[in-house]
Image: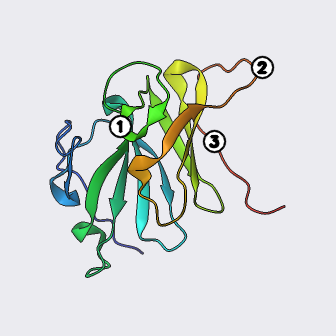
């Protein structure tokens, strides 16, 4: 049997550290939902649904423990709107899930309340996510409350 332990959050709803970054253990969340892990298992992307933000937990170079990770907001400013933009200038209505592309240069985000799928890209694997652009995926399909997604790796 495995051991379950808390890696982030205080058990209280809120948005401490939403505007900045800090220790994962002191961060507050408001209905965290979808998550995606980087292939090196050093970055965990989390949809902070009711705070309308995309946040990242990043392990430090000095510790492999998740409890020592740093949490930062990489997209969304907490405003309930639909607005494409760079990093925290983007706005979500109700994000629910997230997936990381195989090359790890893009995130795909379901914005269920907005009936949309959103896409966030960064220039290179060394570029900071907060500089990435969030755009709405153009489609002629009509979506109704898209709450989850999956990206198939390979063929």
User: Dot 1 corresponds to which residue?
Assistant: 88
Residue extending farthest bottom: 62
| Dot 1 or dot 3, earlier in sequence | 1
Quadrant of the rendering where the C terminus is positioned: bottom right
Q: Secondary structure at mark 3?
A: loop
Q: Secondary structure at mark 2?
A: loop
Badge 2, how many Cα within 10 Å: few under 14, some, many 20+? few
Name the colour scheme: rainbow
Residue extending farthest right: 155
Q: Secondary structure at mark 1?
A: helix
Quick check: marks 1 and 3 in contact, CB under 8 Å? no
| Dot 1 or dot 2, earlier in sequence | 1
User: Dot 3 corresponds to which residue?
Assistant: 149
- Could you tell me which residue is drawn at 64 percent across and 19 percent down? 144
- Could you tell me which residue is drawn at 30 percent across and 69 percent down? 66
User: Dot 2 corresponds to which residue?
Assistant: 140
| Dot 3 or dot 2, earlier in sequence | 2
Q: Is residue 94 left or right of residue 67?
A: right
Q: Nearer the viewer, residue 24 or 103?
A: 103
């Amino acid at each position: 049997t495995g051991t379950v332990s808390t890696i982030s959050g205080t058990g209280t709803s809120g948005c401490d550290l939403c505007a900045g970054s800090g220790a994962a253990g002191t961060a507050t969340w408001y209905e965290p939902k979808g998550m995606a892990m980087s292939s090196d298992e050093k970055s965990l992307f989390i949809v902070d649904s009711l705070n309308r933000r995309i946040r990242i937990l990043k392990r430090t170079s000095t510790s492999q423990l998740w409890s020592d990770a740093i949490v930062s907001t990489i997209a969304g400013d907490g405003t309930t709107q639909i607005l494409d933009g760079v990093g925290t200038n983007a706005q979500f209505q109700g994000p629910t899930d997230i997936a990381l592309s195989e090359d790890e240069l893009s995130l795909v985000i379901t914005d269920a309340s907005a009936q949309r799928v959103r896409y966030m890209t960064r220039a290179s694997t060394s570029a900071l996510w907060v500089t990435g652009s969030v755009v709405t995926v153009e489609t002629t399909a009509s979506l109704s409350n898209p709450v989850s997604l999956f990206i198939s790796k390979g063929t």
